[in-house]
Amino acid sequence: MTEDCLFCKIVSGEIPSYRVYEDEAVYAFLDINPASEGHTLVAPKKHFNSFTDLGAEDIAALFEAAKKVTLALEKAFSANGMNIGVNNGEVAGQEVPHVHVHVIPRKKGDGGRGIKSIVWTEPDTANLEGMAEKIRKAF
Ligand SMILES: [Zn+2]
């Protein structure tokens, strides 16, 4: 637990939340400013600032829980689909520096769009092989 972290306080119960799911490693609760009905945040109980700080077991637990939440939201709200995503870093829209997965139920005709609507900078696609090579070299 990190003392000044909002989500650590939610996980510990110091700050109340609308809990929807909990297991040993993960706590899931309603986003109080939801993008759609049922919008849920799935967070590891242990504090991690960033997605890239998670170990393999942490990732497995987090995404297994996100899958369970997705299935429950489909059932609860008769959702036609789901956006499942992580805002990683402030520039990417991460508002609380405690890693969490957004699970956002979608319905036909809701007016929303897909994950590419988050950002569209029109990068040069003339050399996709060069782009892929640059990434491969970064591993
Ligand atoms: Zn935290």
Image (spheres, helix red, strand yellow):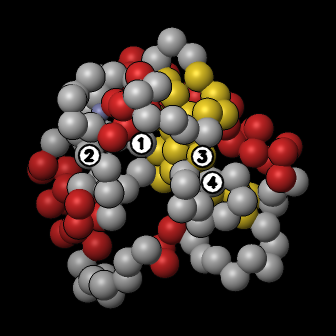
Residue count near mark 1 (Cα–Cα under 10 Å), binned few <14, some 14–19, many ≥20: many
> Which residue bears the numbered disc 2?
97
Give me the C-alpha separation between circle 1 and circle 3: 12 Å
Give the amino acid type for the residue marked by disc 1 in the picture: His
Residue 33 visible in this rendered orientation of the protein = yes
Q: Quarter of the image containing the C terminus?
A: top left
Q: Is residue 77 above or below residue 121?
A: above
Instruction: Report the residue at 34% width, 30% height from top.
Output: 8
Q: Is residue 88 above or below residue 14?
A: below
Element marked by disc 3: strand
Q: Mark 1 or mark 4: which comes first in sequence? A: 4
Front residue (pair 7, 51): 7
Give the amino acid type for the residue marked by disc 4 in the picture: His
The answer to whether residue 73 is left or right of residue 96 is: right
The answer to whether residue 24 is left or right of residue 47 is: right
Give the amino acid type for the residue marked by disc 2 in the picture: Pro
Instruction: Report the residue at 32% width, 57% height from top.
Output: 95
Element marked by disc 4: loop
Q: Does the residue labelled 2 lie within 8 Å of ligand 1?
A: yes
Q: Quarter of the image containing the N terminus?
A: top left
> Which residue bears the numbered disc 1?
100
Give me the C-alpha separation between circle 1 and circle 4: 12 Å
Q: Is residue 81 above or below residue 26?
A: below
Give me the C-alpha separation between circle 1 and circle 2: 9 Å
> Which residue bears the numbered disc 3?
30
Q: Is residue 83 above or below residue 56?
A: below
The answer to whether residue 134 is left or right of residue 92 is: left
> Which residue bears the numbered disc 4?
39
Q: Residue furthest top?
A: 24
